[in-house]
Image: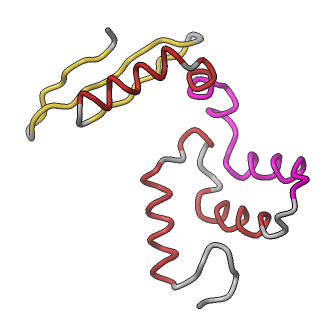
């Protein structure tokens, strides 16, 4: 199994390490169950594993990904470009694979502090 138990000052953490497509995928979890679920998903879902190791995720910035998406977007949602521009202004220089839940939460906290909805350009 590719799950390592690591001793920390405050207890234990669990690290999943797997080689996929010549790239090491490594992620740490506080709970063993979360590490096991992530490992199982890596092994069972090839699309998920490919996403984590893809060259585009490592090289493409969020701004580039949003621009490429908007070029192909044919949906009815006319406000999507405005919302994506907002996200790009906050996280756009990060590589697409480096945008994490933590960075999204921090951006949403900033947004809440300004009393601005990500779906509207005017303050509430």
Relative vertical location of residue 3 with respect to residue 104 in this rendering, above or below: above
Residue drawn 79% across the image and 64% down it: 81
Quarter of the N terminus within the rendering: top left
- 35 relative to 122, above or below: above
Classified by dominant secondary structure, the portion drawn in magenta counts as helix
Tell me where residue 30 appears, x and y as whole percent.
23, 37
Can you give x and y, in whole percent of width and height, for residue 2 in the image? Answer: 34, 12
Place residue 80 in its image quadrant.
bottom right
The magenta-colored residue range is 51-75
Residue 89, picture quadrant: bottom right
Indicate whether residue 69 is drawn in magenta.
Answer: yes
Q: Could you say which is closer to the camera, residue 77 or residue 87?
A: 77
Instruction: Give the residue drawn at x 9%, y 41%.
Output: 10
Position of 81 with respect to 50 (left or right) is right
Q: Is residue 119 magenta?
A: no
Residue 72: image location, x then y, percent: 89, 47
């Amino acid at each position: 199994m590719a799950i390592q138990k690591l001793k920390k000052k405050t207890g234990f953490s669990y690290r999943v390490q797997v080689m996929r497509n010549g790239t090491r995928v490594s992620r740490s979890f506080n709970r063993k169950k979360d590490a096991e679920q992530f490992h199982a998903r890596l092994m069972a879902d090839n699309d998920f594993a490919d996403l984590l190791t893809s060259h585009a995720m490592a090289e493409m910035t969020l701004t580039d990904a949003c621009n490429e998406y908007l070029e192909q977007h044919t949906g009815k949602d006319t406000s999507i470009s405005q919302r994506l521009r907002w996200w790009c202004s906050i996280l756009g220089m990060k590589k697409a694979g480096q945008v994490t839940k933590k960075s999204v939460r921090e951006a949403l906290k900033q947004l809440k502090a300004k009393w601005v909805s990500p779906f509207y350009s005017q303050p509430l």
